[in-house]
Every structure is written in structure tokens, then in C-alpha cells.
Image: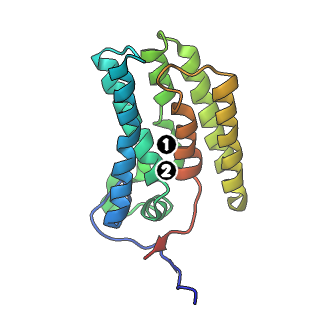
């Protein structure tokens, strides 16, 4: 016999911008666990000498990795879908309004610019080109009817992998950055999906 599916858009509790207010402990744990994955790989690369970063570069790389890895999984959580695809509540304040605005939230993700300037021999080209492609993809998904947003986002993610692999040479140690950022935002954050409860 099929179990009953609970779809619920209402939430309450202490405001949580990372996992979504009202997240189950298992959802929070998944977000935190995923946030540690890429930093562990980067620490291995730094320790093995595969990348030669100074202390500042390593700290910034770990911060970007923590954000992208954790955000990629967190944006797929039912609690995040529920939280970010409902109107801001008064108690969430101005920060809630800003973070729940899909364009503003996306614009803050200047990761490729930071990577290009700090790790790509201070090259604006890499950062601005990827940032432009990223924002164009965000705009494309937001202008797409809801019933097509998921497949369109997947098309754009596929293109990001191809561009990353064959057209724009990735920065050493950041081969993961743009495809995973596309998954995190272009699909994970922007695409509205029904949020389930236990």
C-alpha cells in the first residue's frame, strides 16, 4: 500500500537561512556534511602540493568550497524549498527579504570573480565571463514558465559542464566550481518544487 505523501508549504520556528526554518535534524546534518566534502578535497590538494596556495588563498578556497558544497545539497532540502519559495515573514527582517529574492540571492554569488582574481593570475576575464554566463542562466530560468523550469535548468547545467570542460579553462583546484555553482543556484535555488514532510 502506498504511503501518504505530505506536501507542506507552512513552516514555523527559529529563522534558519542555511537549512530552511523548520528543517529536520537529518536535513541539517546533510547540509553540514556536504559542506565539508569539497574542503576536504582541497586540503588534500594543498597538502599533496597539487596546488600552491598561500594562507589567504587557502582560506578563501575553503570558504567558497564550504558555501558551494553545503549550499548545493541544502538548496535541495525540502525545508529550503519550503523556506525560499514562500513570501518573507516579518520576523525574517530585511535579510529575509533579500535572501528570498531570487535575483538578489543569485547576484551575491560572485564566486567566479573571486576565483579569477585570487587564483587566476588576477585575470578578470575568467571571472566576468563565467559570472555573466551564470547570471544569464539565472535570468533564463526565471523567465521560463514554471512547468519548464526544471528541464531548462538541467539544460543550462549540462552546458556549464561542457563550457567548463572544453571552452573556458578552469583554474587549477577549482575545476568543480562553476558546474557545482550552477547546480546549487540555477537548479537548486531557483526551481520551485513541492516540499515534503515526513
- Residue at image position (59%, 55%) is 191
- Crowding at label 1, few (<14), some or many (≥20) Cα neighbours within 10 Å? few
Quadrant where the image shows the N terminus? bottom right
Question: Quarter of the image holding residue 40?
Answer: top left
Observer-nearest of 179 and 97: 179
* Vertical position of residue 163 compared to residue 156: above or below: above
Q: Name the residue under label 2.
A: 101
Q: Mark 1 points at which residue?
A: 104
The answer to whether residue 137 is seen in the rendering is yes
The answer to whether residue 94 is seen in the rendering is no
Q: How far apart are marks 1 and 2 (CA)?
A: 5 Å
Question: Quarter of the image holding residue 131?
Answer: top right
Do the CB atoms of the residues marked 1 and 2 lie less than 8 Å apart? yes
Residue 12 lies, in percent from the top left, at 33, 71
Q: What element carries label 1?
A: helix
Residue 27 lies, in percent from the top left, at 38, 61
* Vertical position of residue 181 compared to residue 22: above or below: above
Amino acid at each position: 500500500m502506498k504511503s501518504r505523501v505530505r506536501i507542506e508549504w507552512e513552516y514555523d520556528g527559529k529563522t534558519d537561512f542555511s537549512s530552511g526554518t523548520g528543517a529536520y535534524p537529518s536535513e541539517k546534518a546533510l547540509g553540514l556534511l556536504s559542506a565539508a566534502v569539497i574542503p576536504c578535497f582541497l586540503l588534500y590538494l594543498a597538502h599533496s602540493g597539487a596546488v600552491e596556495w598561500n594562507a589567504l588563498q587557502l582560506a578563501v578556497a575553503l570558504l567558497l568550497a564550504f558555501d558551494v558544497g553545503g549550499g548545493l545539497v541544502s538548496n535541495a532540502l525540502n525545508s529550503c524549498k519550503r523556506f525560499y519559495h514562500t513570501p518573507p515573514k516579518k520576523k525574517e527582517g530585511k535579510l529575509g527579504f533579500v535572501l528570498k529574492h531570487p535575483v538578489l540571492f543569485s547576484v551575491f554569488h560572485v564566486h567566479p570573480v573571486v576565483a579569477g582574481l585570487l587564483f587566476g593570475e588576477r585575470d578578470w576575464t575568467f571571472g566576468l565571463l563565467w559570472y555573466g554566463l551564470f547570471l544569464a542562466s539565472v535570468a533564463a530560468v526565471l523567465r521560463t514558465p514554471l512547468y519548464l523550469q526544471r528541464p531548462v535548468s538541467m539544460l543550462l547545467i549540462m552546458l556549464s559542464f561542457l563550457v567548463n570542460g572544453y571552452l573556458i579553462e578552469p583554474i587549477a583546484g577549482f575545476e568543480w566550481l562553476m558546474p557545482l555553482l550552477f547546480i546549487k543556484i540555477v537548479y537548486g535555488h531557483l526551481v520551485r518544487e513541492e516540499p515534503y514532510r515526513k
